[in-house]
Amino acid sequence: MRINRLLQPIALATLLFAGTGAVNAQTVGLNWNPRTGDVWVDTQLADINRYGSSYREPFIDEMVRYHGAPRDLVTDLLINERWSAGDVYYACTLAQAVGRPCRYVADQWQENPSQGWGALAQRLGIKPGSAEFHRLKKGFVPTYDRWSRPIDLDGELTRAYPNRSKGKAKTAVSARKQTEGKSAGKMHAGKEHAGKQHAGMAPAAASSKAKGSSSAKTGKVGSNQKSGKAGGHGKGDGKGNGKP
């Protein structure tokens, strides 16, 4: 009985600590703000959070195959350290841009996460608006393409990928032409069918005309034949009767 009484406060403290941790984790999730120094990048990292929470394995595969991150590190950050997918993506992307291991950048971030990613990127030598930062932004596009996930480009990236908008326009024009071609094909097929029906009726009319002409000729021939026979018979009788 005495042991149970001693354990009860410990159990209660454990539950309270667990509940506090859950609340803190939820608060961090609600107040999450990467502060990279670029509004478009912040928006994409928030979208990567949604993708990574729904498709964890494809997200991990992307980090390992294309960003040089060890699988055990990415898994540890997501599960044990409770990092958001956007933070993991940006840490490994920054590391790749400056030629550092992803673990090094992750350790730098954990030392002082309150300063935001923009401050850490500048300490690593990547300033917002620089050529290095622009290359980092461009890296989002092939990542989204591999995920087959739509991505809206800002003005800077639209200039960097001019063919993407043109490709959409060409696709729309091609689809319209295909639709118009199908309609024209149906109309042409209908005309051909009507022509075949008309052609099928023409021989019948010609046949009727031919039959009518043949009948008329037959009638004339028959009339001539009768007339000839009758005339010949009368002529013979006249000659015969006239002789002594």
Image (tube, rainbow, N blue to C red):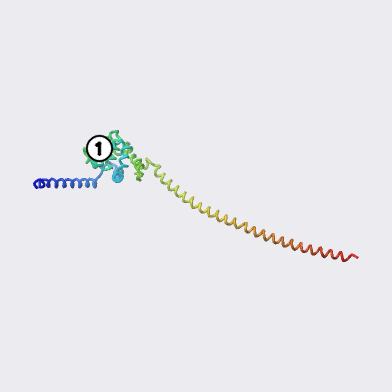
Question: Which of the two residues, 157 or 144, is positioned nearer the viewer here?
Answer: 144
How far across and how far down the image is residue 43, in percent? 30, 45
In front of the other: 54 or 42: 54
Q: Position of residue 25 (x, y in %)?
A: 22, 45
Q: Element at badge 1?
A: helix
In the picture, measured across the screen, residue 232 lies left or right of residue 106, that is: right
Q: Which residue is mark 1?
A: 106
In the image, residue 241 above or below residue 31:
below
Say which quarter of the image contains residue 55. top left
On screen, residue 209 versus residue 161, left or right, reads right
The structure residue drawn at horizontal position 31% and vertical position 42%, both measured from the top left corner, is 57
Residue 125, given in percent of the width and then of the height, sits at 28, 34
* Residue visible at 14% across and 46% down in the picture: 11
Q: Quadrant of the C terminus?
A: bottom right
Give the amino acid at mark 1.
Answer: Ala
Q: In the rendered view, would you say 206 is above or below 28? A: below
Residue ranking furthest to the front: 1
Q: Looking at this rendering, what residue extends furthest in the top direction?
A: 99
Mark 1, other Cα within 10 Å: few <14 / some 14–19 / many ≥20: many
